[in-house]
Every structure is written in structure tokens, then in C-alpha cells.
Image (cartoon, rainbow, N blue to C red):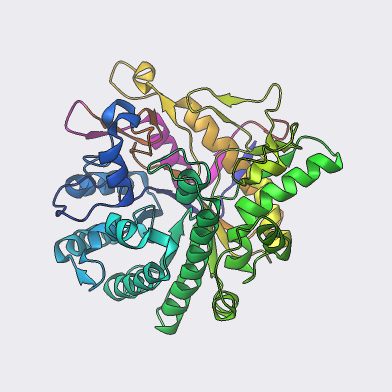
Amino acid sequence: MKQTIPENFILGAGSSAWQTEGWQGKNEGQDSYLDAWYKKENFVWHEGYGPAVATNFMEKYQDDIDHMQAIGLTHYRTSINWSRFFTDYEELIVDEAYVEHVNNVINALIKANVEPMLCLEHYELPAYLLEKYDGWSSKKVVELFVEYAKIAFARFGDRVKSWFVFNEPVVVQTRVYLDAIRWPHEQDTAKWMQWNHHKVLATAKVVAAYKNAGYEGRIGTILNPEVTYARSTSKADQKAAHIFDLFYNRVFLDPAVKGVYPEELLSLLKKHDILFEHDAKELEVIKENTVDFLGVNLYFPKRVQAPKHAWNENAPFHPEMYYDTFELPGRRMNKSRGWEIYPKLMYDMAMRIKNEYDNIPWLITENGMGIEAEEQFMNDTGEVQDDYRIDFIGEHLSWLLKAVEAGSSCEGYMLWAFTDCVSPMNAFKNRYGLVRIDLDNDRSRSLKKSGKWYKQIIEQRELVSEDNEYK
């Protein structure tokens, strides 16, 4: 099967500051939440790897950009590390050495004909603000974040035309305060919702700041809505999927795109006494400042069913009161990562955005395949023969192109990630990149087979694959 890739369709890749930079040049007191967690619980990060060195992008960014240029990458999405952007987070004293690094990266990307896209927060909340203000629990942090955004726009907005406020704003507080599986392991469902709301509010305020300043560009946010499938057509299973969607997906999708929270969600929050503190003015700010476009991170489907057991009345409220996870028998699996492979979720997400969210412009900002011990797939010259990644990208991209043909406003596909990089706890265990990072050879870079394949489809603007309609 041959599919034409539209000429203006983005074929890019992404990463983040904290997952690549390393601590080279970082000052005392500039830890992010991730840095602090790594220092506190180094043992939970695979083989001790983490943000300390990462891919040493601070020193090796030109190597990566040279590879991007060789491949013909159209766009590269990364973040600014908020925790490194200032030496004083309240007085807003800029770390000029770090800003110089960001400027150098932006200029090098543009010189290589790769469009930079910048995200303001990819989990890089300064540890100082977490300790002093309890992080996103505080409206003070919302205001400091808005001021940070204004300075970032002023410094880089002349060259960067596509901005994202957050990457996956639901994740940190879900892992820490709802599920309590990450440091500091504090279970507080009400705090989880307060963090959610303050990030929604911060998104709207940053959108307002960007638009009021009159920059030539656009601003959005990156969400990770889990495409939710009910086990069956039963009313009980359908309700389980509906409520999961409210708590984890629509809590950010609806205010970002429609400007309002779902009324049903607010009713559930009141019922369980976890409604976030807010006032009418905040809701008005959210309503008046919706995003220009969306980034969407998609990896795997979420399958749910009605709960099989009564909820423990002594346990804190958790949305799992309303659903159980369902594992589809016979599902395809990425055995390294433990995730189901279901490429059609791309099409289903696209149709949802088209039908329920006014077909707002959007693109895939993350999708990829992490595989453990890729050394086993090296050929005699040391090149990783990652045909599994080529197949994975091809199947997902194929469904995305079908969605575009069906009228979706999807603007492109960005692979996670351009190079292998660290991720929370997983560190370098599962590799995601088109470019391999050699941990035993000074983080040297080398192109994988998938990198050459990606170059080919970018140049030819054609995807040749098996018909995956029934896959």
C-alpha cells in the first residue's frame, strides 16, 4: 500500500530539556522536581542513569542537529528547563549562560532548516518552588510561571513560532498525589485536582500573555489523552470508559479547547469532596483564552471495564472507584515496555478531535517504540537494525494519513524521540531514538536503520507499507 504524505505534513521528532541536557553548567539550587527525585531515590532509576548526564545535550547538541539536518527532519520539539532558566525564581533573575545555550540551539536548528518548537514545562518545575510553595498547589507558582513565560517569549519569540505551555500536564501529580508511586509518595486526591486546575489556569494565562504581546506565531499545549475503549457494549462498561475519560482526558482537553470544564466532572468532584479551589474570574480567564492548536502524545490504548468489586470505604477516593483496567485477550504487545500496540488509536483520536473538538489544528507530538537491549539487533558495522521501529512508525503513520484523508486537521507526526534519552525510572533501559546514544563511548551518536528510513519517507513524501486495516 502506498500513501502520499502531504507536502506540508510535519515529519519531526521530539525530546525535552531534562531528558537530554545533563547537569553541565548547572548551579547549586537549580534542581528541578526530576533532579530532586533522582537525588532522593536514585535506586529506582534503571542502573542509576538519570538527568545528571542524560545525553549530554548541553555539549553535544550540534551533533544531534547535524543528524537532524542529514535526515531532513522538518521540526524538532524540546523544552526550556524552567529550573535552569533562573538563578532566582521569585525575583526572576535570568541565568544568562543557560539562555545563551537555548539561543545557540535555536539558531543551530534554524541554520539546519529544522523548525524549533518549544515547550515551557516538561516536568521541570523548580524544586525550590515545590519546597517553598508546594508546587502547583499555589497560585503564587501560577503567577511566577506566567512571568517566566513572558520572559521566554521575549527572549526567543522572534525565532520560535510554535509554543507549547505544558507537556502532559496531568502526569506528575497523578503519579505523586493520586497514585503515590513516585517521590515524595504523598497520597492526596484533592491536591491532585488542585494541581490539575492550576495547570489549566496557567495554560489560559500564558495563552493570554502570548496573544496580548502580539507575537507572530501560535501557542498550544501538549496533552496525553488516553484513547479509551470499553470492554463491551454493556451500560456498565460504557459508563466506566466515560468516567475514565472525564477524569484523565477531558479534565484538560475541554478547558484547553472549549474553555470550560465538563459539568459532569465538576459534579463528581463535588460529590467526592475534591473540587478544586477557584473563583468565577479564573473560570472566565479559562473561557476567554483557549489554545491555538494541540500537541497530542499517543502510545497505547486504555481499555476499561466496570469495577468487579466494591470500593474500600476506608481508602482515599480514586477514580478507580468507577473502573477496572481491562487487558484484551490476544492483544499485540511491546514486550519490552509492557504496552499494547494498537495503531488504529491514531485514527480514532483524530476523528474525536474532528467531531468533538471543532477539528482544532493538532499534531502528534509523541509516538514511538521503546525496546530493551537494542545491542542484540546490531549488524556487523554496529548499526541497530530496528525494523520493529520502522514497522511501528509505519503502521501508526498510516492510520494518521488515513485520518487526514477523512478530513482530520492533523498537521503532522513527531517521533519520540530523536535520540535515545532518559525517562523517569526507565532511564536508558528502553531505547526510543532514531539515533543511538552509546553510554560506553562518551555518549557518542550513531544513526539506526530507522533513521535512514525516516530520511527516505521525508524525501520521497510517500509511505509504503502493508495494508494495516485489520491489524
Counting every numbered tag in the picture gives 0
Q: Is residue 459 magenta?
A: yes
Percent of width and height locating residue 206: 43, 73
Membership of 140 in magenta stretch? no
202 or 454, nearer to the observer? 202
The answer to whether residue 44 of the structure is visible from this angle is: yes
Check the image and name the residue furthest to the front.
314
- Nearest the viewer among 345 and 96 is 96
Residue extending furthest toward the right:
234
User: For residue 325, what is the image quadrant?
Assistant: top right
Tell me the residue at 41%/66% (across/down).
138
Seen at 46% across and 71% down, the residue is 218
**In the visual, does 68 lie left or right of 94?**
right
Q: Which quadrant holds the N terminus?
A: top right
Please name the residue shown 35% across and 71% down the image.
149
Q: Is residue 221 above or below residue 320?
A: below
As rendered, which of 141 and 218 lies closer to the eye?
141
| Residue ID at (16%, 66%) | 96
Q: Residue 88 in the image: x percent, y percent?
A: 20, 67
Q: Tell me if 278 is positioned left or right of 302 in this view.
A: left
**Res 471 → quadrant:** top right
Whether 335 is drawn above or below 209: the answer is above
Q: Position of residue 443 (x, y in %)?
A: 21, 34
Residue 8 seen anywhere in this rendered image of the structure: no
What segment is highlighted magenta in the picture?
440-465
